[in-house]
Image (cartoon, rainbow, N blue to C red):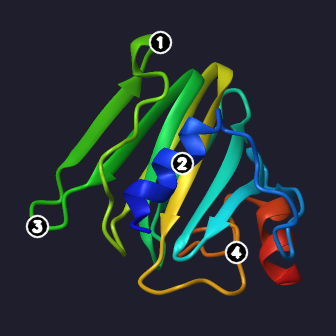
Amino acid sequence: MTPEEIISKFRARNYVPMPNIPGNRIFVTDCTASTLVWAEANVIIEHYMLFPNAVVPLHSHPFVNRLIYMSGDYTGYYLDPVTGSKFEKTFTARDRHRISREEPIGQLHGSKTGARGAHVYNIQIWPSTVTDPLSATLAYLGPSIGPLHDQERARQ
């Protein structure tokens, strides 16, 4: 299956998680809590709850990154690798269930939330099949979000 077909299957199941993902647990940082909900072929989908008034600094991942916005006060941003210009998207109710643009491997991006926090699904599309699913919290290249994030990364 292609990544698009896997994502479509997850959405068609009304976001019901896949059971028994190896190594799955709740991953907690200073501004997020997440858990893996789907792992198939080279696609991992992770349910994120972002805390109110959170800021996730610019960072990147070793996979293509997308997200599905569900609810809350959420603004995502990324830096253009050529110009260094910052592009921002504030998600609203009309964006619910929308799949974001692809952020290529290494794309610097971040996010912030408002008073309601936010609920999103982070989609990891790896270059090859994943045999040991990993949280984006751990496959994170950039400055620490804080002490809880440091503890999570030290556990891996």
Marks 1/2: CA–CA distance = 23 Å
Apparent side of residue 152 relative to residue 139 in the rendered image (left or right): right
Q: Secondary structure at mark 2?
A: helix
Q: Which mark is in front, 3 or 2?
A: 2
Q: Closest to the observer: 53 or 139? A: 139
Query: Which of the 4 quarters of the picture holds residue 64?
Result: bottom left
Q: Are marks 4 and 2 in contact (CB under 8 Å)?
A: no
Q: Amino acid at mark 4?
A: Leu
Query: For the point 89% across and 62% down, which residue is it?
Result: 25
Q: Amino acid at mark 2?
A: Lys
Q: Which residue is mark 1?
A: 93
Q: Which mark is in front, 4 or 3?
A: 4
Marks 4/3: CA–CA distance = 29 Å
Q: Which residue is mark 4?
A: 134
Q: Amino acid at mark 1?
A: Ala
Residue 11, how many percent across, how many down?
Answer: 55, 39
Residue 82, how many percent across, how many down?
Answer: 10, 67
Label drawn at residue 105: none
Q: How many marks?
A: 4
Q: Which residue is mark 3?
A: 82
Q: Amino acid at mark 3?
A: Val
Marks 3/2: CA–CA distance = 35 Å
Can the viewer see residue 144?
no
First reached walking from the N terminus: tag 1 or tag 2 = 2
Q: Is residue 60 above or below residue 100?
A: below
Label drawn at residue 9: 2
Q: Secondary structure at mark 4?
A: loop
Can the viewer see residue 1?
yes
Marks 4/2: CA–CA distance = 20 Å
First reached walking from the N terminus: tag 3 or tag 1 = 3
